[in-house]
Amino acid sequence: MRRQETEEFEKQPLSVLIGPQYSRINIKVYDQLSAIRVDFLPGGMYRMLGIPMNELYDEGFDAVDFFGAEMKSINGQLQDISSLEEGKNIVEKFLLEKVAGLREILPIDHAMRMLWNTNGNMTIQKTASLSYLSVKQFERKCLERIGMNPKVYARILRFSKAYRLHEACPQLSWSEIAYEAGYYDQMHMIRDFKVFAGVNPSVIEQQLLSTPLRMQKDLYY
């Protein structure tokens, strides 16, 4: 992987834990890639790790540093699987064993789930009220549970919706995608593409033509 502003790709650990992501990451696959990805709902990683998410903001880490011998064992097991279904079962078993230690679900978790379900198209005031918190309290809790300001998170959700729509439905025009993702107009969408993808939508369109990987389209939207 490499960041947009760097030239060199860095080989990644066998299991990578990625904190709240803001910046673009480029991935180069050598030969063939078999991977299992676990996506957390907003606040989910905090509830499992108990670490303020702003401490993991925009970085990737070796999962062994967090889970020690357990993760080393998982890595070893995943090297010997005969199918991805078998690997999925190994990972699910590991995660289910963590359920008993999860921190309790709070109203803010339900509120953030609703913001996620609307792809960021709910006001911060409304989301804070569903959390039974003032806007200031809500913003502080968001730094702890999702690692960033809620307005930034809402923008990322909206951008993600637009990006995934293009991956899944490349026949849609960018104006149609902007409308479906909830943008006020196409220029607001272009602005977010430049911030989060580093380039405007037309460049992303050309870049996707040169790669078979579609990393986002199968996420729920």
Image: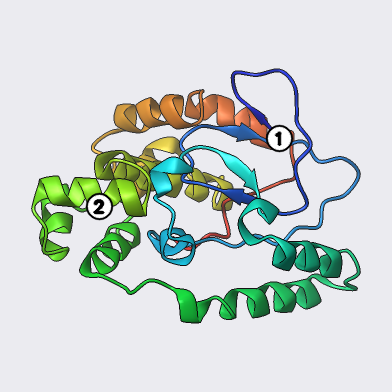
Q: Which mark is residue 1?
A: 1
Which residue is identified by label 2?
Answer: 141
Looking at the rendered structure, the number of numbered marks drawn on it comes to: 2
Residue 124 position within the rendered picture, expressed as x and y whole percent measured from the top left: 17, 49
Is 97 drawn above or below residue 109 in the view shown? Answer: below
Discs 2/1, front: 2
Instruction: Name the amino acid type tagged 1.
Output: Met
Name which quarter of the figure residue 76 lies in. bottom right
Q: Quadrant of the N terminus?
A: top right
Is residue 179 visible in the rendered structure shown here?
Answer: no
Q: Could you give the CA–CA distance between mark 2 and mark 1, rounded to whole angstroms?
A: 31 Å
In this rendering, is residue 57 above or below 146? above
Badge 1 marks a residue whose secondary structure is loop
Viewer-side residue, 130 vs 70 = 70
Q: Is residue 167 left or right of residue 123?
A: right
In the rendered image of this protein, does residue 42 appear above or below residue 30? below
